[in-house]
Image (cartoon, rainbow, N blue to C red):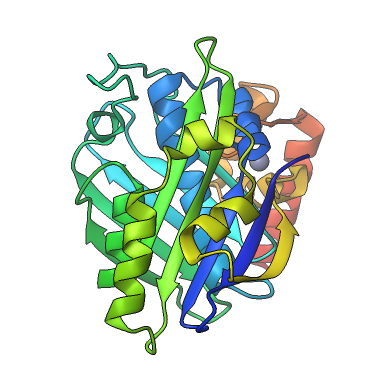
Amino acid sequence: MNDYLVKAIDKTKNLRLLTVNAKDMVAETQKRHDTWSASSAVLGRTLIGGLLLAAAGLTGEEELTVRLLGNGPVGATIVTAKADYTAKGYVQNPHIALPAKSDGHINVKKAVGQGWFEVTKDLGLKEPYTGQVPIVSGEIAEDFTYYLTKSEQIPSAVGLSVFVNPNNTIGAAGGFMLQALPGASDELIDRTVKRINALPQLSSAFLDGMTPEDLARKILGTDCKILEKQDVHYACDCSKEKYAEILATLKTSQLNDMINKDHGAELTCNFCGDKYHYSEDELKEILTKKDNQKD
Ligand code: ZN
C-alpha cells in the first residue's frame, strides 16, 4: 500500500493543508464496481474529496456522507468517509464512458450534470447535520471548494485527480484540500493561489511519482511543516449481521414470501458489492426475533 495522507501547515501557521495519494483506494473501488472511465473519474474524485473532508474535520467515531446528485449520465454518486482515514462509495451508473474533451481529459462535468452537492455529517448527535449547495461546476474539486466556502464558511482550495488507463485500471489518484484560517493575510493567500495555479497537472505529477509531501511543499512552500502522516484505505463496514438487521425491518409478509416462495434471500451491499446469502432457516430465525420484539 502506497496510499497515505499528510497534514501540513505553512510557516505562518495560517494555512492548513491536506494532501493525499489515494491510488490503491480508487483502484479497489474501480475493481469492485467495474466502473468505466467517466464513472471512475466521478466516483474517484468524490471519494478523495470525501476522504480529505473527513480527515480535515472529523474525530473519533464520526463519519460523513457526500452525495453528488447530478442529472448527468453517471447518476447519483454516494461516498462515506470516516475520521479513521477510510472511505467507501458507489455510483448509480458504473458503465459510463464519454468522448474525451479537446484537451484529452475525461469530461467529468458532462458526466455529472447539474443538481445538488450534499454533505451529511454524523457527529454522534441525535440529528445528523446536512449542508447542501448547488453543483456549480461538476468538476467536483470546485464543488467541494464551493461547499466549504458557502456552507462551512471556510475559505478553501481543493484539487482532485484520477487518471484512468485505457484498459480502465487506475493509473494515479490523489488530491489536496487547503483551508485558510482567520489569521491568513491577503498577501499570503495571493501567494498561495499563485502557487496552486502554477502546479503541474496533478495526475501527470502523481504518475511521475510525486508524493503527498512534495505536493504540500509545492503549495505551502519548502519551509512548511509536515505535522502528520496517515495511511488511508478503502473499507466497508458491512456484515451479514448488519444486513440481517435491515431484513428484520421488512414486513412479516415480505419475509414470509422470501421463505415460502424464494426459499432464501441474497442481499448485495451497494458500497462494496459483497453479497450476503440468507437460507430459509436463517430467515425464519430473523422472523422469530422480529415477532419477539413486538411482544
Ligand atoms: Zn459493504
Question: As drawn, which residue projects farthest toward the front?
Answer: 222
Q: Residue at x 51, y 65 (%)?
A: 221
> Can residue 154 be seen in this snapshot?
no
Residue 284 in percent (x, y) is at: 75, 40
**Quadrant (top left/top right/bottom left/bottom right) for the N terminus:** top right
Question: As drawn, which residue projects farthest toward the top?
Answer: 167
**Quadrant (top left/top right/bottom left/bottom right) for the C terminus:** bottom right
Q: Residue at x 25, y 35 (%)?
A: 109
> Can residue 7 be seen in this snapshot?
yes
Q: Is residue 249 above or below residue 9?
A: above
Front one among 31 and 264: 31
Q: Is residue 97 above or below residue 277?
A: above
Residue 241 in percent (x, y) is at: 76, 48
- Residue 45 picture quarter: top left
Q: Residue at x 35, y 39 (%)?
A: 76
Ligand 1 lies in which image quarter? top right
Q: Is residue 283 above or below residue 260?
A: below
Q: Is residue 4 above or below residue 194?
A: above
Residue 236 in percent (x, y) is at: 68, 46
How many numbered marks have been drawn onto this rendered protein structure? 0
Left or right: where does residue 23 sit relative to residue 154?
Answer: right
Front one among 241 and 101: 101
